[in-house]
Structure formats: C-alpha cells, structure tokens
DNA sequence: TAATTTTTGATCGTTTTTGCTTGATTTATG
DNA sequence: CATAAATCAAGCAAAAACGATCAAAAATTA
C-alpha cells in the first residue's frame, strides 16, 4: 500500500469517527505501528489532524460536543474489558443482535475473524462491521441523528423478521426495583423487541449505570444476563435477583 | 505497446484507484520498471499526476497545476451539476428515495435545508444525511461491503413499505436498445423495486454511461427521466425515446 | 541496407521506507 | 503517591524503491 493511500484512510477514519486509534489504523491499513506513528506525525505536521495519546483526533477548532469520539476514551478500559468478555460468548455460526451504543461498538473489534451474522440498528456499528468484513444486516427504519440509531415503528416491524441466538445491548440505568431503562422510549421499545427475539440476552453495563433509573424501561432485571465491572454495594442483591457476570479488567 | 497507450493506462489507473503502484503498472502494461519510472517522471512533468515512493497518486487538488487536477474538478463539476439540478427538482414535503452511489451522494449537500424525508439503501448516504440532519429512513437488509449498499430479498421486502414522490438513482449503463443496467443483479433488483414505488423517476448519469450495457438490467429506457450532461452522437435518438434533461455545467 | 537516433530493459550502488527492539514517558488505577 | 499497563520516540538493520548508467533492441533516416 502506498503512502497516500494510507494517509487517505487515516484522514477518512479521523473525519468519520472524530478520532482514530493506532491499533485500528494498523488493522485497516495493514501497516505496522511505527509506520502509522510516522504517518500521524507527518499529517499533524501538515495540520490535517491532531496527535493524541493512542492515536489521533480531529483538529479541534473550538467547542466540539462530546460525541462518540470522547465517549470512546472516557471509560474506555472498563468498556473494553466488558466488550471483550461479551465477544468471547459469541460462537461461530451464531446470529447475533448488536444494539446501537458505544459498548457494543467496542465488541466488534473483538469479533474479527468469527464466522457470524450480525444484525444491528447502529450506524456506527455498521461502519465498523463493514470495515471488519463481518456479515451484516441492518435494521430498516427511522434514523435518529443524535445517537445514530435506527428506531421507530418501522424498525420494530423490520426487526421481527429475525430471530437471534444472542443479543447484546447497553443501558442507561439498572435498578433492583425498576430493572433496565434508557431515556428515549423509542429506543427502549427497540431494545425490548430485540430481547424478545433472542435466545440469550446480555446487557453490557459499566458500574456507573447501577442504581440509575431512566424514563423508558425496557426489561425486568431477570430477563437478561448482565455483564459488568460493577463491584459496588448492592452486588449481592443483584446476584440474588439475576445472573450477573463481573469482569475485572 | 506504444508510449501513448502506456500513458493512457497509467492515467486511467491513477484516476480509478487514486493511486498506482509501479509493480502493478509493470504487470498491466508489460513494460519494465525502468520504463514505467520514466513514464511517471514524464507525466509528473506534465502535471498529470504526483510521483510518490512506490508509484504515483492523484495530484492534491488545491495548490496544484491545472491539467489532471482540472480534469478531476471538471469531471466533479459535471457530476455536481447533474446532482445540483436533480436536487432542485425536490419539493418541500416530498418523500424521496436515494439509491446508493456517488452521484446521489453528491445530491445530499444540495438538499440541505429542505423539509423532506429521504429513504436510502446507501451507507455513505446515511452518514452524509445525518451530518446534514435530514429526516432519514434506512432500508433494512443485507449489507454489501464493497459498495456499502443494502441489498437482498429482505431489503426488497422492506422497501415495499414505502411509497415515494420521487426517486433518484445512478446507473452503470444506458443503451437505446437495452435500457438501464448495472453489474450486480441484486442491486438491479433493488433499483427496479424502488422505481416501481415512485411517482417520478430520475436516473442520473454522466456522459460516460451512455451506450454501455451491464449484466443486470433494471428498467426500460422510457420508464424514467434521465438527467445527464451527455451531448453525444445519439442524443437525438434518446430524445425521441425518452425524457432526457441535459445539464451543462 | 547502413548509419543514426530513440527507446527499452537490466545492473548496481545509493537512498528511502519499514518494522522491530529498547528504554523512556504517559496514563490508568488503587 | 506508587505501581502497572499502555504508548511513545529513537535507533537500527533489512527490504524495497530509486536513479544513473550502459548496452541491446527498435524505429527513423539517409
């Protein structure tokens, strides 16, 4: 691969995700870490991106909203450990559902090379899945721009066409009394539907989600397994009520 | 092989892939490395491409001489002129279908600010549409990685849920006798379905598509309007057979 | 046909790029 | 604040690409 082509790929990645990890760039270009580093230095020299620890990001002009880009670095490690464990649950030949959201997004890099079929309603997921050449179906329906998720009644109908061996999704809140919840009722409805179509159901949640309640409830506590790094006060209460796997990174 | 022929091949390769490796050019022309090197030097001298380690790449558009750069922007201009005109046909309140492909992609920036609903099967289109905050639905179904388009029987079924005021799509070939065609029959099927669901049907095609025939036919000549910049030999024949709008940039 | 010019392909020493290693630096975490 | 993990920069050696040179082949001209 020629240098301009690599640079092109790097710039497109940065433009698309507002951030790019060196490891991902190594994957998508086939070059070594050293080469990518040198490329990033060079591109920074030209003012085309900003070098950051672990990769590069958009040349932040001013007030950028904390979109996918920053979310990625925030609880990145915890999320990655959870995502990695979740991915290890996926078996060759399975058909799985990946909900929109940053944790399931992290899963995808760990799914590389598996012979699986993925259905998703997340636009970012789609991009990553095509990059990794994983067999993919997208749920049709209304595109909610802020979260880049496909939702709405059309999406719910389309979802019904599938049956899943496993589904993986994030959540905004987990509560002993109220179960799983997320702010947007439309997204809650999609999650609920996906759960009902799956044999095995996994909710991925870092510790910050525990004992939080949002507007749209989408499942009771005992309707899904939880994969988390939560080791807080109520862990035993949760263990009594549902199946919970604590991952320590 | 004659020198101009080699140069032609080199330029086409660079134009097509935005980059060309010397080894590949050696293979595709049958000439030696030395010869290719000399060719590249010469072509660079003429400002037609940029020499890089290992081969050649497109001229970086901005601060470069006209020649190739001009050709590209001119080509881009044509496409953009077609896209711009097509976008002007869209009325507030309309529900339109945008097929996957580069020309309809160009349309999106011209649709900014319009109060419309867009349905698409193109992943790149999706990204652009979310960027421009245009009300969007995505067709569900199998994701073909290479073209980043949603296709297959599921996609066809899902598409049937909609009815469009207008649809816009590209094509690979237009022929007086064989109508519109594209290489992949699956994509042809989607196009055909979308056409059947639309009140007004527009095919966007630059002049290079005329008198070309691909494997998958998706419509007869009289089943859609053509928006193009073609002013070639058979223009009058086309005018007799169908509704064709020639845009001059 | 013979002489001359141009183009081509191979060779070879030099330069550039690349990937790995190592020790330093930064970041995360308790 | 201290420790562990990840990331980084610099140096180095191997590989790839380069450019200059020259003789053979092809085209042109006399």
Image (tube, coloured by chain):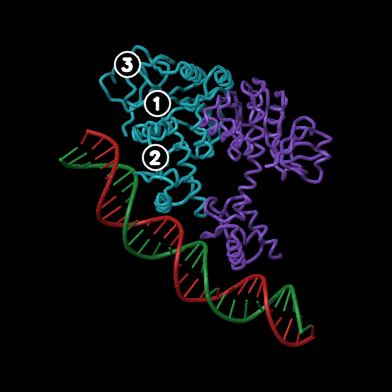
Chain colours: A cyan, B purple, C red, D green
SS type, badge 1: strand
Q: Earlier in the sequence, mark 1 or mark 2?
A: 2
Residue A172 spot, x, y in % from top left: 38, 21
Q: Crowding near pointer 1: few (<14 within 10 Å), some, many (20+)?
A: many
Q: Is residue B162 above or below residue B36?
A: above
Specify the label residue A60 is tagged with. 2
**Cα separation between marks 3 and 2:** 47 Å
Specify the label residue A240 is tagged with. 3
- Give me the chain letter of mark 3: A
Q: Crowding near pointer 3: few (<14 within 10 Å), some, many (20+)?
A: few
- Give me the chain letter of mark 1: A
- Which residue occupies the foreground of this view, A113 or A130? A130
Q: Is residue B228 above or below residue A138?
A: below
SS type, badge 3: helix
How many discs appear? 3
- Residue sitting at 45 percent across and 22 percent down? A201
Residue B236 spot, x, y in % from top left: 83, 40
- Residue sitting at 33 percent across and 18 percent down? A212
Residue picked out by circle 1: A204
Q: Is residue A177 left or right of residue D14?
A: left
Circle nearer the viewer, 3 or 2 = 2
């Amino acid at each position: 691969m020629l240098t301009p082509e690599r640079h092109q790929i790097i710039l497109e990645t940065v433009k698309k995700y507002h951030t790019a990890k060196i490891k991902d760039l190594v994957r998508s270009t086939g070059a070594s870490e050293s080469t990518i580093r040198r490329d990033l230095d060079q591109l920074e020299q030209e003012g085309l991106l900003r070098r950051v620890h672990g990769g590069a990001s958009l040349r932040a002009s001013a007030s950028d909203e904390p979109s996918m880009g920053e979310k990625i670095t925030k609880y990145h490690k915890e999320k990655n450990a959870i995502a990695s464990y979740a991915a290890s649950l996926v078996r060759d030949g399975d058909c799985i559902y990946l909900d929109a959201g940053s944790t399931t997004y992290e899963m995808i890099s760990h799914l590389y090379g598996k012979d699986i079929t993925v259905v998703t309603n997340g636009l970012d997921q789609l991009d990553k899945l095509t990059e990794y050449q994983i067999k993919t179906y997208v749920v049709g329906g209304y595109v909610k721009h802020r979260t880049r998720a496909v939702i709405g009644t059309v999406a719910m109908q389309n979802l019904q066409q599938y049956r899943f061996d496993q589904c993986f999704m994030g959540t905004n809140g987990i509560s002993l009394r109220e179960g799983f919840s997320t702010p947007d009722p439309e997204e809650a409805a999609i999650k609920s539907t996906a759960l009902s179509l799956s044999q095995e159901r996994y909710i991925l949640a870092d510790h910050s989600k525990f004992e939080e309640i949002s507007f749209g409830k989408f499942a009771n506590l005992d309707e899904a397994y939880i994969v988390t790094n939560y080791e807080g006060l109520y862990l035993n209460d949760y263990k009594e009520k549902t199946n919970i796997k604590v991952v320590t990174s």
